[in-house]
Image (cartoon, grey):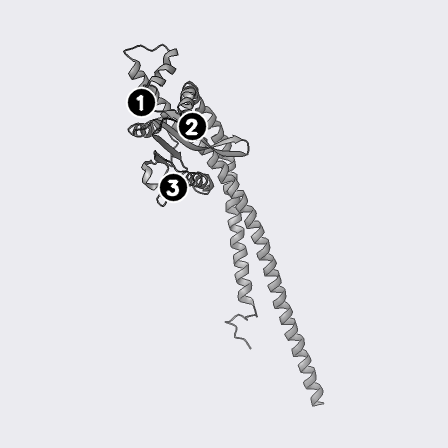
Amino acid sequence: MVPQTQKRTYPGGAQLKILKRRAGTVKQIGKITGTMKVVASSKLPGAVAKAGRVSTFFESLDVTTIELVNKLREDEDTERNLLTVIIYTDKGLCGSTNNQISRMLEKQELKNQKIVLWGEKGASAWEKSKHAAKVVFSAHPALKTPLTFSEASGVAGEILNEQYDLLRIIYNKMVGPATAEIQEIWLPARSTLDSDAGRNFLATYELEAVAADELLTSWNEYQLSAALNYCHFQNLAVEFFARRNSMENASKNAEEVGKKLNLLYNKARQAAITTELGEIVSGAAAVDEMLKAKK
């Protein structure tokens, strides 16, 4: 007899416990990812709306210089120094938004370019990049509070201390209700605005001679600050979009894995029951044979 202080063990019982525990763990993971998907879905409309509201401050300035920038970019005879600002996200569960930009830039030569990284995760991703030597500095906005225009202006001030002719900002943007893509913004430098091409372009505007230099400086600073603010909130909307998609996929995967584990558990349990029944039948048959032999 088995002592009352011990539980009877069954063949394959340990495997059944492992499968049951794994199925329970996967089920809990599915609940967590499902909740995070709901949270990201609820925040996405607000992020898209805010990205639309901050667009006005930048787009009105971008229209005035886009023709000048296009002319400078089309001039292939002049070799220009470029500065690229890459907008990364520091939030988790949406790594594809960062990886796509990094993979795209790894394929480019980035000749005569300096790089400024926006976001801590972007800085860590570039440590092993072949273009790591081109990074001049990285900016790390606060994660727990929304970005303010003052923070964007502070980063813009650091960027303006660098020497360049044209500036490129790379970021993610929602281009449809369920579509996001990588986009670029090109801005002229202060020296470019003050060149002959810049002066000719701005000749249509009435500028006082005394205040022209100050106006160009202020315009350049404000346009860059507005562009960084604009790109950050566009990227933030894509961040919630990517997180919602990743959590939805994770929930589906958890459900599929849970079904497979339950199937394995049921098969193992049925196999154990079948084995035990076979042992009982075999034992009963052996007892019958013994009784017949005694007779």
Residue 24 position (above or below residue 104):
below
Q: Amino acid at mark 1?
A: Ser
Disc 1 on helix, strand or loop?
A: helix
Q: Nearer the viewer, mark 2 or mark 1?
A: 1
Residue 43 position (above or below residue 128):
above
Crowd rating for badge 1 (residues with CA inside 10 Å; few <14, some 14–19, many 20+): some
Q: Residue furthest bottom?
A: 295
Task: Kindly identify which residue carries mark 2.
Answer: 185
| Separation of marks 3 and 2 at Cα, in angstroms | 21 Å
CB atoms at circles 3 and 1 under 8 Å apart?
no
Task: Kindly identify which residue carries mark 3.
Answer: 121
**In front: 100, or 165?**
165
Crowd rating for badge 2 (residues with CA inside 10 Å; few <14, some 14–19, many 20+): some
Disc 2 on helix, strand or loop?
A: strand
**Which one is earlier in the sequence, the residue at label 3 or at label 1?**
3
Residue 162: x percent and y percent? 29, 30
